[in-house]
Image (tube, coloured by chain):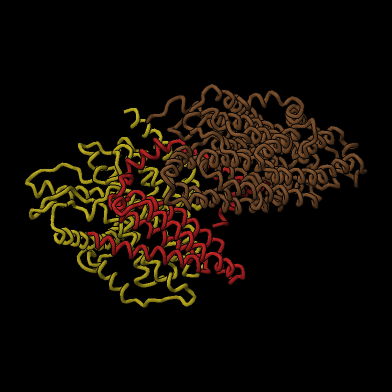
Amino acid sequence: MQMPLKIYLLIALIKTVLSLAVMASLIAYVQLAERRIVARMQSRVGPTRVGPWGLLQPLADTFKLLLKEDITPSQTSSGLYLLAPAISVTLALLSIAVIPFGPVIHIFGYTTPLQITNINVGLLFILGVTSLGVYGIVLAGWSSNSKYSLLGSLRAGSQMVSYELALGLALVGPVLLAGSLDLRKIVAAQAGGHWFILPEIVAFLIYLTAAFAETNRIPFDLPEAEGELGAGYHTEYSAMKFALFFFSEYANMITVSCVATLVFLGGWAGPVFGPVWLSRIVLPLFWFCLKAAFFLFLFIWVRGTLPRFRYDQLMALGWKVLVPVALANVLITSLVVAWR
Amino acid sequence: MPTSLMDYLRILPEIILTVFGALILLVEGAARGGSRGRIAGALAFIGSLLALAAGISLIRYPGTAFAGMVRVDSVSIYFHILILATVAVVTLLAMDFLRTDGHPRGEFYALLLFAAVGMGFMVSSDNLILTFIGLEISSISSYVLCAYRRHAPKSTEAALKYLLLGSFATAFFLYGITLLYGASGSVSLPAIGQSLAGKMAAGGLALGSLIPLAAALIFVGLGFKVSAAPFQVWTPDVYEGAPALVTGFISTAAKAAAFVILLRVFYVALRGYSQQWFWLMWVAAILSMTLGNIGALRQTSLKRMLAYSSVAQAGYILVAFAVIAQNPAPRVLPGHAPVSGILAGPGVGAILFYLTVYTAMNLGAFAVIARVANRGERFTSLSDFAGLGKRHPGLALAMTLFLLSLLGVPFTGGFLAKLYIFQSAFQAHLIGLAIVALVNTVIAAWYYLRVVVYMYMRPPEGELPPIASSPAWTLGAACCAVVVLWLGILPGHLLHWLAK
Amino acid sequence: MLNLQLILFLIFGALAVAGGINMLRSRSPIYGALSLILVMGALAVLYLLLGAEFIAFVQILVYAGAIMVLFVFVIMLLNAQPLPPHERARFARRLGLPAIFILLGILAAAFALRYSRARLAAGSPMFHVRSIGQALFHQGLLPFEATSVLFLVGIAGAVLLAARPETQSSGTDTPAVKAADRSGL
């Protein structure tokens, strides 16, 4: 960076605050969108009362959760019980640090990427942080000292460890094609419309499936299967602590959607035109958000459509189908890269 | 640096074994009911024979491979042949044993082959990283093999003890490697040797005090694997609890491979420090021989007795190591004489000969025990062998041969093996050590001969089930017996080859 | 920037040591495992400070994210209880503490003698993904591949030892296994 340290830190601070603010409001509105879309799929209306088209509903929910009584069951391991939601939400938000939302921009005479920070193993960072996310859930279940919670968190633990493997292996194909773990270079390698979704369609499908399991979404939401386990790992949590788990689930959804966009759909690439501010800043951001929004819609769509897997089906799918296919994909991709 | 075909030719035995091991796992996964283990056994036998052929063909490709990771020299070829032949024989011995013992699963053979892969890397590795990985492969296979009869509490206990203590030993070994690396800046054995020699020539070493510590730690790790005293406490329990054939395997091939590491680390890398490690070997040799033989005197279980005996046998081999330390051979830097350099020193030939004979006779003895012990390994005590001479003359004769050879009676391989070691000790003026070894041999006579007495001069106790016939076993045991006799009567071939 | 690095190093170095000590003295298995995770995480940050991004995140991914999850998982599944104090533990402590300091001293001496300050400051170029790949797949190709045999042995052995005992009716064992699987979780 050829800029004074103060300015550098200032820019970093602005980007961090901005990203977190956008993320927080985005999470709130993805929730609203989910309620409305699923309602539509089920021939209902969904929340419409607070504000026009229910747009202020997230605000009302937040206040409700903040003002609710915060109950801590008496038999919990208190330290871990408090720590678990904090771990969950911290790790969920940490991934945003390395996700690039757009190209490098020149603004007020300074050059900075549209990204909090760029590291040359960004994808690895995201995988590492995601892999830690399971601790929030596992500790929540264990410290609650409740059977439902424990079973839910055990399921979560085994499920996330199993699907992490498939998730990681699915990403190896695009990484091999791009020759880098740097998210910017991966996007750059797809320039000119050579999106990796075409050569790596198998990896894409595996990634998508595993992403559903990693975020504990339907059809893989066994850790919180309400028919069997109450509310799963967060049965004993209420008010804001529950909200933090809720929050981190949606944050994880946004993260995996962003990664899918970056790795398979060419990131912020798309038709651009007009003056510099439009073609270099606004339109790339728009395309990025559009692609990510598509994945978020997919999450909601699937939730409204598919039933839940049985536990043994889940494990069989992960280990006997996804992992072998992903391995074969890695092998074939490496052969192609080697011969090329 | 790209790898060439030659690199792969030099690890061809390991490649073959790995392929066959994986093949067995696949075949076993598909096999059901009665066919379990049959195909696997056949595959394992074919695989070990092919690997043996590849091992012999290594003679034509001496040199290094994979950027100095692997060194194909006379020692590695010799031990490849020894270990692979052992695997082939164990496969033969196991074919019927596994089924009659009620544990037909063919993964046994896969683990056997994988263990041999590890041992192959152990004997041919010239780099401590590869040595360590080879050691781990063979160790972990051995742990699982020990637990093979996993419904028998003793088998599980043996595996658990072996696993826990083995892990500690591995940690010691690894810590020794790190210190050696810290002192020399390399994990390649010749490079360590050169670096240390260079630093010694330059007038001492700033980190000189690290070397004895590193040597001691490595010796602890390897001493455990070869069950040298004072790291032998696990041996009786593990050897008794593990299935007899597995014991036969880990007490021979695994030990031989660990001795090769010991040889390479101390002879190649720590050559300049022989004065220090001489005492290490000296103490361990005396302790092993004495504790092993005295411990064996009181045993009524044959497997335990042979376990103590194998501690003592390790002691005899350590005598030869002390001889090597006493007489550091002409300073041939290993890099200059890749093939014959390591054999030049006195004592090395004796070690090779002893390990060959020991492998044949010990494996043979455990093979007989496996037969007599019968289904579920119920009959392993001394009284179960009473009257074996009448019940099953062939088995009794074979057992007598192996025990006499372990004792070191003339016209068996064991006699000459001991002779060479004692001779080298006398030549090196290690009179005290040689006398201790001789006294120990006399003590050992009591417990070896007691078994022979039981077999021929005592009536059988109680009603024992008949011992089922097994052609494959007979072939395997015959191989052991032939080697023992052949090396006892006509050792010239091997000695000539060793001298070369 | 050097000061910032020093401060971060002190913070995370202290965290790593504290985690390690806490792991040793914790009687509850779950807290022991969590302390170990803390150590792994703190070490990863130290690697990061040294510029070894790849190692740092692989450390997180493999140790904290995969291996320790299994540890915690097993502890929870077995519902392992805190250990009562043990006579031998006290003995081990008396023997272990001096041993720790001796080993620390040796390592410190080795590093102090071997690596000059200048060499430490210069850093090592070994840390980039490409150079790690070069080291693994060129010089270290054979050990790397041999490790796969090691893992295969581990997997085969674990499956062999953990497999359910074969029932008499080996032909129809699938439904029983499934029911057991489902009741397990």
Q: Position of residue C151 (x, y in %)?
A: 51, 43
Residue C163 at least partly seen: yes
Q: Looking at the picture, how far across and down is residue B398, in whole percent?
A: 81, 34
Q: Quadrant of residue A22?
A: bottom left
Q: Quadrant of the C terminus of chain B?
A: top right
Image height of A340 relative to B100, above or below: above
Q: Quarter of the image containing the N terminus of chain B?
A: top left
x, y (%) of residue B252? 67, 39
| Res. A181 image quadrant | top left
* Letter of the brown chain: B
Residue shown at 33%/53% (left/top)?
A: C116
Q: Colour of chain A?
A: yellow
Residue found at the far top of this picture:
B60
Query: Residue at horizontal 35%, vertical 30%?
Result: A338
Q: Position of residue B242 (x, y in %)?
A: 70, 47
Viewer-closest of B159 and C117: C117
Q: Chain coloured red: which letter?
A: C
**How many labels sit on residues?**
0
Q: Is residue A230 visible?
A: no
| Frontmost residue, B452 versus A270 | B452
